[in-house]
Image: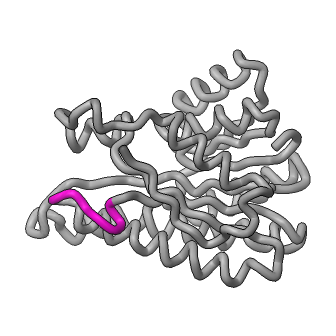
Amino acid sequence: MSESVVIVTGGGRGIGRAICRRFADSGAQVVAAARSQNELDETKSLIEQSGGRCETILTDVTQPDQIGHLIETTVSRFGRIDVMVNNAGVALLGNIEELTPELFESMLTVNVRAMYHGCRAVWPVMKKQREGVIINTSSVSSVDPFPGFAGYGASKAWVNMWTKAMADEGKNLGIRVFAIAPGAVETQMLRGAFPDFPEEQVLAPEDIAEMFYTVAQPSCRFSTGQTIFVKR
């Protein structure tokens, strides 16, 4: 991945930060995007301490114009986008009665609409290049949701189908599309919902980041459209 340009949304912490660091370790130019500048600065610092390259762009993925700015700025600075990782997401725990319309809409805005806008914004860039990889963050909950994760699991099931449909359209354009669906990962998101989740059943963010890096390699070019589940 040396010299590749890689965008990672939700790159300020957790899985997103681990993905940024993994691609940077390979020599890629990483563009980390998130809503918190402090978290982005920490990601950038960690990467540069290891000799990697990282630019940060403050981005609220719930705002389509900011996603457009992220894509346009990256192309303006680096001339291309080789990998787009749509990782930003939210997981709201609550049974059906607790999942109010407001909470449901807020989750759809990040997990579904933002991913749609991210993919749609980067598509013309990769189409013009005749190559590129889009990787979407899904979840094991898309097929086996924890109790209280009905809304979250359903939003991630959409990601799986969206990924497959995009991959089918992208085959003749040189665009490959994948989804990575982790189980429980040691992140702030997990502990916020399940503070007592058993440690022996939890993956490290670096384990998931490795899968993102792997599917971006040319060796996975014939596996486009797959949702890859990663769990202990």
The colour mode here is one colour
| Image-based side of 40 in relation to 101, left or right | right
Q: Could you say which is closer to the camera, residue 9 or residue 154?
A: 154
Residue positioned 59% across, 82% down in the render: 165
Residue 63 in sight from this viewpoint = no
Q: Could you say which is closer to the camera, residue 203 or residue 71?
A: 203
Residue positioned 37% across, 53% down in the render: 90
* Coordinates of residue 57 in the picture (x, y in percent): 67, 43
Q: Is residue 207 magenta?
A: no
| Image-based side of 39 in relation to 67, left or right | left
Q: Is residue 143 magenta?
A: yes
* Coordinates of residue 95 in the picture (x, y in percent): 12, 63
Residue positioned 80% across, 57% down in the render: 218
Q: Is residue 1 above or below residue 219?
A: above
Q: Could you say which is closer to the camera, residue 76 or residue 5?
A: 5
Q: Quadrant of residue 126?
A: bottom right
Residue positioned 76% across, 70% down in the render: 175
Q: How many marks can you see?
A: 0
- In this view, the residue farthest toward the left is 97
Q: Where are the magenta residues, as a range?
A: 141-147
* Coordinates of residue 152 in the picture (x, y in percent): 31, 63
* Coordinates of residue 89 in the picture (x, y in percent): 44, 54
Quadrant where the C terminus is found in the figure: top left
| Image-based side of 10 in relation to 103, left or right | right
Quadrant where the N terminus is found in the figure: top right
Q: Is residue 9 above or below residue 106?
A: above
